[in-house]
Amino acid sequence: MNAHTIFERDLNGEMVSPSDPGYDELINAIWDTMKMATELNTGYHTPDEVRRILSVILGCEVDESITLLPPFYVDYGKHIKIGKGCFIQQCCTFFGRGGITLGENVFLGPKVNIIY
């Protein structure tokens, strides 16, 4: 096993195992992200509130030009980048532990799954 963190190994597509050092930190980060997604998906939120919660999930500021219509399902959002002007319809799923990048002005229809 190399000296990279489990997060770096996971992002690079390397196999990670519950017996690996740092696995608890990784799985807890996934649970934390899923908790925030549940908050996003529960009840009505204004567009600004949706972007605020999405910013927490992604770990970076989300541009005000981005529209996300919940529900939105995600396992670990820190490796997901969403460009300006993107529109993400309801019921999309992003499993982005290997990294997902949406360029500017991308429109995703309902129930799109991006798994990487």
Image: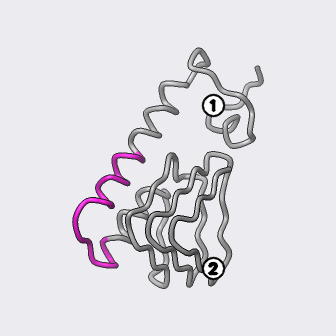
Residue 2's x, y, as percent?
77, 24
Return the mark for residue 6: 1
- In the image: residue 53, left or right of residue 19: left
Relative to residue 30, is residue 81 depicted above or below?
below
Within the image, what quadrant is residue 84 found in?
Answer: bottom right
Sequence-first disc among 1 and 2:
1
Q: Secondary structure at mark 1?
A: helix
Label 1 packing within 10 angstroms: few (<14), some (14-19), many (20+): many
Amino acid at circle 2: Val
Q: Is 90 above or below relative to 25?
A: below
Quarter of the image for the N terminus: give it. top right
Q: Residue at x 68, y 75 (%)?
A: 103
Picture coordinates of residue 97, whole percent (x, y): 62, 46
Find residue 85 and report its horizontal and vertical position in percent.
Answer: 56, 84
Graded by Cα atoms within 10 Å as few (under 14), some (14 to 19) or many (20 or more), the crowding at tag 2 reads some
Q: Is residue 42 magenta?
A: yes
Residue 62 lies, with reference to residue 37, above or below; the image says: below
Instruction: Tell me the residue at 32%/52% (across/down).
Output: 38
Q: Nearer the viewer, residue 102 or 64?
A: 102
Mark 2 element type: loop
Type of amino acid at the residue the image marks with label 1: Ile
Q: Nearer the viewer, residue 55 or 114?
A: 114
- Residue 77 disc label: none
Q: Label 2: which residue? A: 106
Q: Main secondary structure of the magenta part?
A: helix
Disc 1 to disc 2, C-alpha distance:
31 Å
Q: Residue furthest top?
A: 19
Q: From which residue to which does the magenta span run? A: 33-49
